[in-house]
Image (tube, helix red, strand yellow):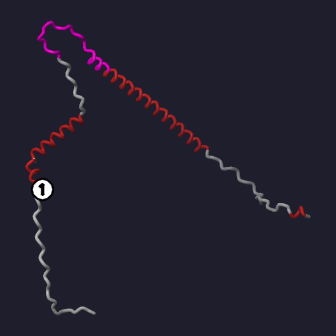
Amino acid sequence: MADTQTADTTQQVTSQIPIASPSQKNPKRVAAGKALAEKRRQAREEQNKKIAEADAIMAKERLRKAEEEARKTEALVDPPVEPPVATPAAAPAATPAAESNLTTSQWLSIASIIVSLAAIYYKREEIKTTIAKIKAPAPKAPTPMAPVVMEKSGGIRPMD
């Protein structure tokens, strides 16, 4: 009797109706998704190839510029040796003129500074007068007049 009372009565109730089969995917949609993924993969690969080509071109250009700079510096450092001239009054050899290393924006900023200095020089008299006005003490303000008191006349009387 004790065994029947301790029996587990919390069993799960299950339905007797069979579960519907899992939903089927649309094969056309699946095929379209795969085709789209393949197109994206090919486009990505093509873009990576173009980037690699551009990097190679840029590297070749940098190498060419570096070699050109090296040739220029080598020519400046090791000028060709000329045999000394026997004349004692010979003028010293002129060094090649150094190229200007300023960029366009630097030239424009220098030009704007010069123009602003010229404008200040041109308007110096106006500037002097304004500075003189600032330094001069301001005239005293007139003292306010005493308030005028008017007599109350008859009229509307206040309410108490």
Magenta-highlighted residues: 70-93
Indicate whether 11 appears above or below 122.
below
Q: Quadrant of the C terminus?
A: bottom left
Residue 18 horizontal side relative to residue 56, left or right: right
Residue 129, position in %: x, y? Answer: 9, 53
Give the residue at the far top of this rendering.
Answer: 86
Residue 141, position in %: x, y? Answer: 12, 68
Residue 74 part of the magenta-drawn span: yes
What kind of element bears circle 1? helix
33 vs 112, nearest the viewer? 112
Q: Quadrant of the N terminus?
A: bottom right
Which residue matches tag 1?
Answer: 135
Which quadrant would residue 77 be assigned to in this image? top left
Indicate whether 12 appears above or below 148.
above
Q: Residue at x 15, y 6 (%)?
A: 86
Q: Amino acid at mark 1?
A: Lys
Residue 94 part of the magenta-drawn span: no
Give the residue at the far left of this rendering.
Answer: 125
Q: Residue at x 79, y 60 (%)?
A: 11
Residue 124, position in %: x, y? Answer: 9, 47
**Dominant secondary structure, magenta:** loop
